[in-house]
Image: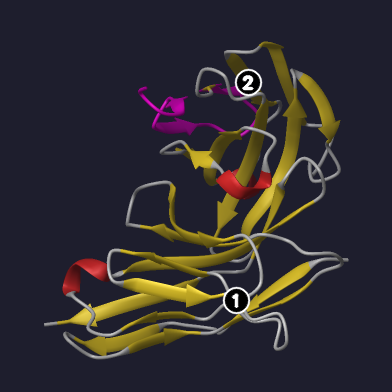
Amino acid sequence: DAGVIQSPRHEVTEMGQEVTLRCKPISGHNSLFWYRQTMMRGLELLIYFNNNVPIDDSGMPEDRFSAKMPNASFSTLKIQPSEPRDSAVYFCASNLPTDSLGYTFGSGTRLTVV
Amino acid sequence: GNSVTQMEGPVTLSEEAFLTINCTYTATGYPSLFWYVQYPGEGLQLLLKATKADDKGSNKGFEATYRKETTSFHLEKGSVQVSDSAVYFCALSEGSQGNLIFGKGTKLSVKP
């Protein structure tokens, strides 16, 4: 298995532009998580899905952020409009709903908003 | 609610030194406990885990023991290498979904 695949690896965009981050979870994993990592706040859970359904989006910072999971093999995190304070590394992770296995993380998308 | 507290870094050690990174947790019930490692420019990787009290997780020379009486899961390694330089995250799982609660991470730098 190729693991959790995120794209793009790096994204530089101008303030006000729409940004879409993509994630392909491991086949068979039915939970998917989006995290944001910054020096100031560390690792923050933004939203997670179970069986493609959003379960908890309380970590999504503002209405500018939205996430979808149209099927079991694909999810997007969209920021519209983007702002410089959104600059961070965004990670996607997936797992099976048995807590002993932990998560598998993607390599992340480093977003820079200028 | 559930939470994880890690010692603050950064931690700087010389090669072959002994490593301890402290982790304590607050949880209802009996969570599983994890250590993840993040190498520069990469995502987090599972390093080791323990699913019940007194279990010892181990991998790549690292060990951690699930101590229910002290609610701790300290990470140890007897002799660190330069290649161990990374950020280490302690985490616990909660709920039937197994969602992870992470600590803030501890950066380790090992000098030759």
Is residue A113 in sight in this rendering? Answer: no
Q: Quadrant of residue A19?
A: top right
In magenta segment, residue A103 = no
Label 2, on which residue? A76
Query: Could you tell me which residue is drawn at 76 percent across and 69 percent down?
Result: B3
Residue A9, image x, y percentages: 39, 32
Q: Is residue B86 above or below residue A37?
A: below
Label 1, on which residue? B54
Q: In the shown orientation, is residue A74 left or right of residue B35?
A: right
Q: In the shown orientation, is residue A98 left or right of residue B21?
A: right
Query: Could you tell me which residue is drawn at 56 percent across and 57 percent down?
Result: A38
Tell me the SS state at disc 2: strand
**In the image as oriented, which residue stretches furthest toward the left?**
B112
Kind of residue at disc 2? Thr
Give the crowd class for mark 2: few <14, some 14-19, many >=20 residues within 10 Å.
some
Q: Quadrant of residue A66?
A: top right
Residue B93, image x, y percentages: 70, 55
**What separation in Å lies between label 2 and label 1 (alpha carbons)?**
40 Å
Q: Is residue A43 above or below residue A24?
A: below
Q: Chain of mark 1?
A: B
Q: Nearer the viewer, residue A100 or B100?
A: A100
What segment carries the magenta color? A1-23
